[in-house]
Amino acid sequence: MEKIYYQEKDENSMSEFAKFYSKLEKYDCPDYYSIIKNDVLIFEHFEFDSSNHKRKGSTYRKKLASIEADKDLGVKHFELPSTLTSKNYVNNLTRSFEEHYKKIELYKKNIAKIAKSDGDINFKVCFFIQDVTPLGNYSNDNNKPLTIFDCKQFLDLFENSPDLDWVLFYNKEIGYEEITWFLSRDSLSEYRKNELDFNKVHFINRSPQCIQARIMIDKK
């Protein structure tokens, strides 16, 4: 992550996060952690998209997995299923958020075992959330790219989750650079000013086209 954007009100929290971020260590449960004396950051990552979600997961991911598993030579054309809706967006995001949030105490317990602290441990928890919807999500009304920070339902989730301190959000908009945003509780009121009730937002429902080419290269 070369560039992280944040609101002015998040400047102090962002500075604190940056100190932790430079010392992140990979782990299993949570995904990463960082220790600075008696201060510990729990850093947990998850992804979601706005496609239909069935028992075996995202229909987009299922199709992409089948494409990647196809090893036949030649050029093939694929179309991803067109199931992008704001309802799927909210449901998938909420499901993933709640699955990880309920494990926070377990994350803390695991890291406390390896933290060499000479006193009480001060925990900070950050979720790194990625919207991996191919081509991104856009409003059908004005073609505006949409993120979790536009979403009233997500802001409600964050505000009502006291064990979560920070959120890092990654999104790649079509035709734009990769965007990573940082959010703390200090700036929630700023995002609230422009929040959208996603139950009332209609997404542009794209059907991404994929071309896969596999050739045999002579090692000689």
Image (spheres, grey):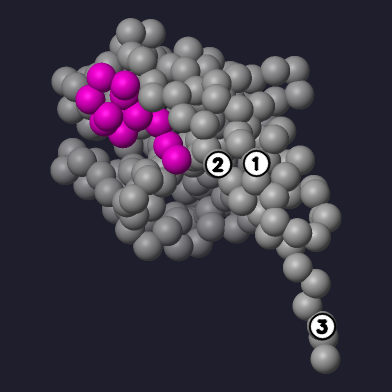
Labelled pair 2, 3 in contact (Cβ < 8 Å): no
Q: Are marks 1 and 2 in contact (CB under 8 Å)?
A: yes
- Name the disc covering residue 78, or none: 1
Comparing 58 with 179, the one in front is 58
The residue lying toward the viewer, choosing from 152 and 79, is 79
Residue 32 location, x and y as percent? 59, 49
Q: Is residue 90 magenta?
A: no
Query: How far apart are the alpha carbons under marks 1 and 3?
Result: 27 Å
Disc number placed over residue 209 in the picture, else none: 2
> 35 or 62, which is in the foreground?
62
x 50%, y 61%: residue: 23
Image: magenta residue range? 135-146
Secondary structure state at the residue bearing disc 3: loop
The residues bearing labels 2 and 3 have C-alpha atoms spaced at a distance of: 30 Å
50, above or below 2, in the image:
above
- Residue 41: x and y, percent? 50, 46
- Examine the image and state in which quarter residue 42 appears: top right
Q: Amino acid at mark 3?
A: Asp
**Label 1 neighbour load within 10 Å: few <14, some 14-19, many 20+:** few
Please say if 51 is above or below 62: above
What amino acid does circle 1 point to? Phe
